[in-house]
Structures are given as C-alpha cells and as structure tokens.
Amino acid sequence: MSSGPAAPVPAPPRRPFFLLRGRFWVASLPWAWLLLFFLLPFVLIVNVSLSTPDLAVPPYVSPFSQPQAEGRPVFPPAFNPDLGSYRRLGDEVADLARPGAELQYLRAFGNSLLLAALTTLCCLLVGYPFAWHIARSAEGTRNTLLMLVMLPFWTSFLLRVYAWMGLLDSSESGLINQALLALGLIDAPLQLLYNSGAVLIGMVYSYLPFMVLPLYANLVKLDMRLLEAARDLGARPWTAFVSITLPLSWRGIVAGSMMVFIPAVGEFVIPDLLGGGGVLMIGRRIWDDFGPNQDWPMAAAVAVVMVLLLIVPIMVFHRHGGRGDGAGEAGP
C-alpha cells in the first residue's frame, strides 16, 4: 500500500510585534539599570578624577573646558585632563621602599583590604556551619532560622552599630565589661571599643547574613544520598566533607565571599563609629577628601582605582563561580 505525499508542516504562527517588543524591553532592563546606576556614575567620577582642583563650587575645573572665541563657547570643547591626582598615588607607590614615607592612601587601602579579608574569613567560618544547619533542618525550623538571619535588616543600620557601641563600651557601663566584672574574670574594664577588634566585630555582625544566605541557597540543593554513599563506603565525616560537601558548595562560598568582601573594603560607618577615627580605612580617606579637604579630584581618583582593583575578584568569581554548580542536586 503506497502512502501519499507527506502533508506540509504548518509554519509556526508569527508572534505579534508588540510581544517581541515587550520581550526586548524586559531583557534590556538589567542593562539599562547597569548603565544608569553604575556606568554613568562611574564615568562622572572618572571625569572628576581628571579635573583640576579649584576654589570654586564645585571645587574643580572639568577637563572638558570650553575655550571662548569672541565671547562664545567653542564646540566641541577641548579635553585637557589633569593627572595630578593619579601622580600623587603613583608617588606613594614609588615611596614604598623609602623609610618614614607618609603613605596615607596606601596605608588606608591596605587596612581596608586586611579588615575586609578578615571579615570575609570570619563570616565564612561562622556562616558555613550555620547555613549547613539551616539547610538540614525541618521545614518549619528552617523558615524560623531564615527569619532570624534576616531579622537584623528590619532595624536601622546605624541603630545596630550604636548598639554595639553600648556593648563594647570600655568603661564599667559597657555591658560586656559589666558581665566580665560581675563574674570576676577581670579586675578592670577592658579596652574593647575604638580599635581594630571592635571594627572587625561590627563588620562581621553586619555582613554575616550576606554570607549565610548564598551558602544556604547552595547547600539546600545538596543531594544527601552522596554523603550516605560516602558513609556506607567507610569515609569519615571530615573526608566526606572535604571530598563532597566542600567542592559542591564552592559556588555558594565564592558568591558569599564576594558579597561580603567587596562592600567591606569601602566600609565607612563602622570604622568611624567603632574605630573612633583610629582605624584608617579608604572610605574615611575618600570622605575626608570630598568633605573637609575639598579635594574632589583626589577622592575621585582613589575611588576609580579602588573600583578597578575590585574588578579582579569579580572576574575571578565569574571565572570560577560556576564550579560545582548543580552537581549535588537530586535527580528527578
């Protein structure tokens, strides 16, 4: 029995233009957000960093100066950048080997990197076990623990920092010193406030949720059958953790570390309040140049250099952040 010619396959219906246009606008929203709230402000900051300091309002002369011809501005304006702010930063780098050099910006940036790295490490050491416990808890308990993690965000950031000032007060009225004195563990109040330790405590407390939540989102997808199989094969808990859990949670570790490290580098409020001005960080230097010193080009140059240096860990995240992603998820 011979079969007739195959019926033509109908072409898929064409989507209306307004639907395609709607999809285009929805897809372009993230790019528009980045353009409006990151790229454009960054370009403006670069423009200020290439300006010349001046006793005016604002206190700089833009590199895009407009020469006058017979009383009328000439278009396009000339581009005359002033690299003096970047030269000052370069001079500090060149003075690294000189004893007694006053390296204000490099010292501030070094302190920022050190405190940000310590904050990230402490948040990881504290947040990983907590995120693991949340991920392995029952659903009702899990929701309660997640709410407790996000509970500090319901309170003003400044109020939380001021609360730590009361806890760490170095006088006998400080709550921690009161408890230690009452227990007889110390004879005199400890100097807990206005030092690097107080700044580190405040930063770990403030940024800990940014580590816990990405870790939880990764660990909750971990297939527990892998750990059960490792135990059945005689693997010790530490061996199973290093060989299975840690590699499969790599994406959460990297994401949480970036979410903590990057904002911690530019932290200003916590070092200013808990450090009492004795802990110099780059955020404070930028504030001083924008404020009392009225050196906007220098402050902008420091901000530009800081952004460019922070692009490195972001590139590392994009390069290695997907390692182990989804490998531990349970099958259908």
Image (cartoon, rainbow, N blue to C red):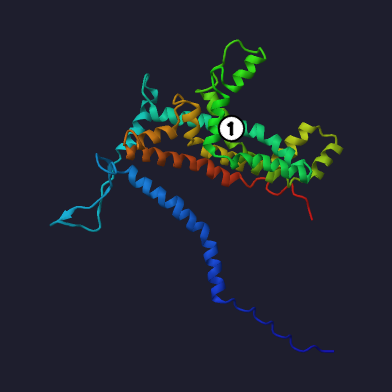
User: In the displayed structure, does residue 196 sit left or right of residue 230?
Assistant: left
Camera-side residue of 48 and 325: 48
The image shows residue 70 at horizontal and vertical percentages of: 12, 57
Q: Please name whichever residue, 63 or 177, is drawn nearer the observer in this view of the structure.
A: 177
- The image quarter in which residue 119 lies: top right
Q: How many marks?
A: 1
Image coordinates for residue 170, horizontal then vertical, percent? 54, 19
Within 10 angstroms of label 1, few (less than 14), some, or many (20 or more) residues?
many
Residue drawn at point x = 44 percent, y = 27 percent: 280
Residue behind mark 1: 204
* In this picture, residue 215 sits left or right of residue 107: right
Q: Residue at horizontal 52%, vertical 60%?
A: 29
List x then y, in percent, for residue 187.
60, 10
Badge 1 marks a residue whose secondary structure is helix
Residues 301 and 205: in front is 205
Q: Amino acid at mark 1?
A: Val
Q: Nearer the viewer, residue 273 or 98?
A: 273
**Quadrant in the rendering for residue 233:** top right
The image shows residue 88, relative to residue 326, as above or below, that is above
Visible residue check, residue 252: no
- The relative height of residue 94 versus residue 253 in the rendered view (above or below) is above
Q: Quadrant of the C terminus?
A: bottom right
246 vs 9: above or below: above
Q: Residue furthest left?
A: 70
